[in-house]
Image: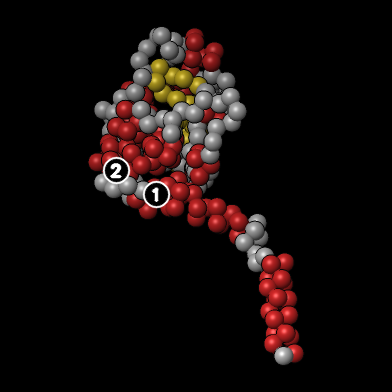
């Protein structure tokens, strides 16, 4: 159940009421707002992050829903801003209000997106979700991070990383599970091994194998000729 009376819910409903009723829209809500709506209405954030194929900038401006007009305020961004596990859509919750389809990523995908920066409020989100739900379990977080393994790659040239994914992951592990984690061993290496197998890169080195066989054959012949 979503608490539409929460600040983020009231703001989203104001946006929906201002949209033309004769057209279908799809809006994805991410960041802290879904956590406020679904888990704890007191978990507040300054903004409500959304993305959509439709541009709502004019509506947001005319209805005074953006930054500088209210708190929380609406912020529409590109879909690429939401970095999380590649399969996040399979876990997302979808609901329809009139002519608008709303997509809410699963809490674990919202948390993984926060892991990249892990500011104080991001770590607070991990604590809140874990305290209120007992989730994510360690094995669940490992699995989803394996599906988000490319977040551990070096940034593109000219890109400023939001934070240190390795350090942030270890920090969350100590906070939630009270132990350390070897990110390379538990998250990255298993995925690299699976990718290698999928691309056939783990096939035996036939040239080396043939060379070993030839060496053993020559050695055997020398022994037989003595």
Q: For mark 2, give the secondary structure.
A: helix
Give residue 58's position: percent from left, percent from top. 54, 13
Callout 2–callout 1 Cβ contact below 8 Å: no
Residue closest to the far front: 226
Answer with the quarter of the image where residue 1 lies: top left
Quadrant in which residue 220 is drawn: bottom right
Which residue occupies 37% across, 31% down? 118
Please identify, in this view, whether the residue under mark 2 or under mark 1 is nearer the observer. 1
Name the side, left or right, on which 163 lies relative to 131: right
Q: Is residue 71 above or below residue 165?
A: above
Residue appearing at x 38%, y 41% in the figure: 169
Q: Which mark is residue 31?
A: none
Q: Is residue 30 above or below residue 142?
A: above
Image x and y of residue 201, in percent: 65, 58
> Looking at the rendering, which quadrant does residue 172 occupy?
top left
Q: Describe the element under mark 1 as helix, strand or loop.
A: loop
Q: CA distance from mark 2 to mark 1?
A: 12 Å
**In this orientation, which residue lies closer to the viewer: 133 or 137?**
137
- Residue designated by label 1: 182
Image height of 18 relative to 136, above or below = above
How was the colour assigned to the protein in this rendering?
secondary structure
Q: Is residue 157 visible?
A: yes
Image position of 147 (left or right of 6) = right
- Residue at label 2? 174
Binning the other alpha carbons within 10 Å of mark 1 as few (below 14), some (14 to 19) or many (20 upward) gives: few
Q: Could you tell me which residue is drawn at 36 percent across and 28 percent down?
A: 119
Q: Can you say whether 154 is above or below 199 in the image?
A: above
Residue 174 place in picture, x, y as percent = 29, 43
- Label 2 vs 1, first from the N-terminus: 2
């Amino acid at each position: 159940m979503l608490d539409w009376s929460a600040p983020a819910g009231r703001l989203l409903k104001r946006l929906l009421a201002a949209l033309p009723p004769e057209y279908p829209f799809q809006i994805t809500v991410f960041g802290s707002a879904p956590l406020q709506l679904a888990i704890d209405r007191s978990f507040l954030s300054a903004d409500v992050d959304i993305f959509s194929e439709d541009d709502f900038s004019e509506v947001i401006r005319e209805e005074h829903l953006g930054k500088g007009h209210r708190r929380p305020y609406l912020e529409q961004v590109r879909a690429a801003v939401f970095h999380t596990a590649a399969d996040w859509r399979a876990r997302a919750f979808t609901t329809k209000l009139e002519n608008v389809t709303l997509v809410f990523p699963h809490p674990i995908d919202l948390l993984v997106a926060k892991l990249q920066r892990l500011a104080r409020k991001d770590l607070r989100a991990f604590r809140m979700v874990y305290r209120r739900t007992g989730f994510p379990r360690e094995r669940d977080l490992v699995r989803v991070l394996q599906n988000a393994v490319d977040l551990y790659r070096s940034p593109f040239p000219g890109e400023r990383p939001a934070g240190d994914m390795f350090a942030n992951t270890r920090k969350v592990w100590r906070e939630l599970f009270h132990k350390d984690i070897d990110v390379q061993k538990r998250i990255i290496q298993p995925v690299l091994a699976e990718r290698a197998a999928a691309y056939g890169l783990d096939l035996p080195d036939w040239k080396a194998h043939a060379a070993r066989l030839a060496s053993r054959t020559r050695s055997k012949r020398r022994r037989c000729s003595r």
